Amino acid sequence: MKKTILTLFTTLFVLAAFSQNDKLVKHNGEKLDVKVLKVGETTITFKYPGEDAEQTIGKFAVATITYGTSGRKEVISDKIVISGEDDWEKVQILTDKSQVLGLKKGEDVRGKTSGLLSYNTAGSADKKATKRIKEAAAKAGAPFILLTSDKNDGFGVKQAIKNGTTYSY
């Protein structure tokens, strides 16, 4: 009887030790019980318990991961809070689609410099267009822009045009 109880206790202990899930907390408040497989440069790869399919989420969507086996808590990214157009400098421009995985798609935005009669250097035109697209995103309350096009036009007169899609938590 003692041997059966000891075997049962040992089996349950081993199962509990190996079945501990990791806790992934997203910036939108959602908490996921998962098994983290890899934390990459821009994404996190994980599996849901009992499933074999690998899932991927961008690091900007994730606040923290608490690892089940060690209990270690890793901060993945800080939440960016946009309160209005004045927070335009906080807006992040992203260029890789994998960075927005797990974020909510918003509206399309555009930033461009004045046309024909404005005289800009290439650098100043780019800075103005960047500021304008970030202001448009901040006005929409979005902390991220996935840049979809970035071009400079003009012969001697420089005009910059940036297009993108906003993303939020």
Image (cartoon, rainbow, N blue to C red):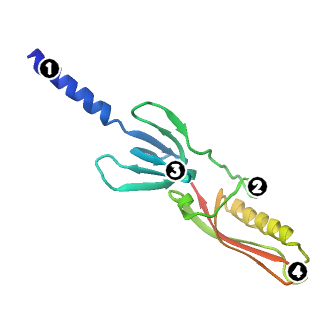
The residue under label 3 is: 40
Q: CA distance from mark 3 to mark 4?
A: 42 Å
> Which amino acid, mark 3?
Gly
> Which amino acid, mark 2?
Glu
Between disc 3 and disc 1, whose residue precedes? 1
Q: Callout 4: 10 Å neighbours few (<14), some, many (20+)? A: some
The residue under label 2 is: 89
x, y (%) of residue 50? Answer: 28, 48
Looking at the image, residue 143 sits to the left or right of residue 37; the answer is: right
> Which amino acid, mark 1?
Ile
Q: CA distance from mark 3 to mark 1?
A: 43 Å
Residue 5 bears which disc, if any? 1
The local secondary structure at tag 3 comes to loop
Q: Is residue 155 above or below residue 25?
A: below
Residue 97 bears which disc, if any? none
Of the two numbered discs 3 and 1 in the rendering, the one whose residue sits closer to the viewer: 3
Between disc 1 and disc 2, whose residue precedes? 1
Q: Decide which of 158, 81 is in the foreground and name it.
A: 158
Q: Decide which of 63, 74 is in the foreground and name it.
A: 74
The residue drawn where x is 41% and y is 39% is: 22
Between disc 2 and disc 3, whose residue precedes? 3
The residue under label 4 is: 157
The residue drawn where x is 66% and y is 49% is: 81
x, y (%) of residue 3? Answer: 11, 18
